[in-house]
Image (tube, helix red, strand yellow):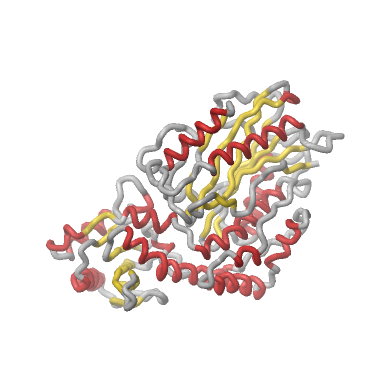
Amino acid sequence: MIPVTPPSFKRITAGASRRWRPLLWLVVLSTLAAGFVPNRLWADFEQGRVIDSADDFAVLAPRDRVAPENAMVNARIKHLLPQLMAEADLDVWLVINREYAEDPVYFTLVPQPSFAARRTTMLAFERFEDDAGQDAVRPLSVNRYPLGEPYQVAWSGESLDEQWQALADLVVDLDPARVGINVSTHWPVADGLTHGLYERLLEVLPESHHERLVSAESLVVRWLETRTSQELALYPHIVGIARGVIAEAFSNRVITPGVTTTDDVAWYIRQRFESMGLPIWFMPYVNIQRPGEACAEDQAFCGVSGVIERGDVIHTDVGICYLKLCTDTQEMGYVLKTGEEAVPSGLSAALAQGNRWQDHLTSSFQTGRTGNEVLALTIDKASTENMVSSTYTHPLGFFGHAPGPTIGMWDNQGETPVRGDWPVFPNTAYAIEGNIKARVPEWEDQWVQIKLEQVAWFDGESVIYAAGRQTNWHLIR
């Protein structure tokens, strides 16, 4: 079992701009008010101690999450959206939703608590030039139920027909040259305007404005993939929780060799997060590799389910979302045989090779380089060292599988059309995901697969791991 060493809050806030520091302290104060000590767990990690208390994770109660989440949404709309709308050359952006058929981008734009777009909810974002000559955005709601800050009410009434007419009148009054709507052939997150709503929009708008409607695809992708400095400052804490639960699960606190099953560990992880009110976005996965369980060089994934025995290699894949930010983490563990004090040297070398593969991938990031180009460079670097590797890295953020550049897929190590052609931008987060295979002398040269995944972000110059990465094995005694 390894200690996880995310940076301290003091070090995180030191790197944040003055604009975002009040929000970070709001999170801390809310945590304290909820009865938690934010740095207790991190202090244990930094001193090399592992988790031994179920109450050590600093997680805000649902009520206390509203203020920081809304502060981040408001800041994104005020400071980020004008830049992205200008980049996409959009004068107005419409996000139109019906209850329980919300646009995928809807919940990233509205204040909490919000569980649905009640009845029909229309959002309109007008880009204009402020008094200083800078791009700014006015967020407007055309809605039966006003949303509150930061939205200004453009219409509030009861009749659906009146609501649609109010939206049409608003667009005509604003007289935009380009109106972005969420329709897309290739990006599901940018295709949230349903066919019925699109047809109704055409009905109410003057025909002279139909040709002004354009796809907001690039805006939606950039909105969802871009991380603000606030979010990047909070990501280490969120990822630290995910890694901490893995460290807890891959220990004798949870695993009794010869008794505990892979499903037992997977359900422990799931229930542990649920006990903290942290939603998982997929069922945790735990599997075993051991001598005698064949792992072929060309096998996509190696690992079986069952009872965890001494001498086993174990692996898990875990993803949670907290404060609207999602994680995706894979780590490896080893169950010591009786009398063993350390992992076999062949397994240590295999994990080191996995870290080397990570270095090849992260050193290939460059602003403007496409996901396909990053993949090709990574494969070239790994090939020069005769690595047996596979790269399938994806963006992270409001979704676990977020939009942005696809960097390989587990079943396609060649180019991915469209999504793989998307370029790398600064301030974007990723699951650095993939695997290597290495022969283990202690296993009679049988292959072992090291499957790794860690949250990181690209700052425009380099890739930074949010809460470190696994460089030593979790050990179960």
Q: Position of residue 125 (x, y in %)?
A: 32, 68
Tell me if residue 161 can be seen: no
Please name the residue shown 30% across and 63% down the image. Answer: 93
Count of numbered marks: 0
Q: Is residue 212 visible?
A: yes
- Judged left or right of residue 216, residue 259 is right
Asked if residue 31 lies left or right of residue 90, the reply is: right
Residue 364, image x and y in percent?
50, 41
Say if 200 sits above or below 308 in the image. Answer: below
Residue 320 placed where, x, y %?
57, 54
The quarter holding residue 198 reads bottom left
Q: Residue at x 56, y 66 (%)?
A: 16
Between 445 and 318, the one nearer to me in the picture:
445
- Residue reaching furthest top? 444
Please identify the quadrant where the C terminus is shown: top right
At horizontal 51% and vertical 54% (from top left) the residue drawn is: 459
Judge whether 346 appears above or below 476 on screen.
above
**Residue occupying the point 76% across, 34% down:** 309
Of 360 and 153, nearer the camera is 360
What percent of the width, then of the height, locates residue 56?
72, 62
Query: Which one is nearer the viewer's eye here, 277 or 452?
Result: 452
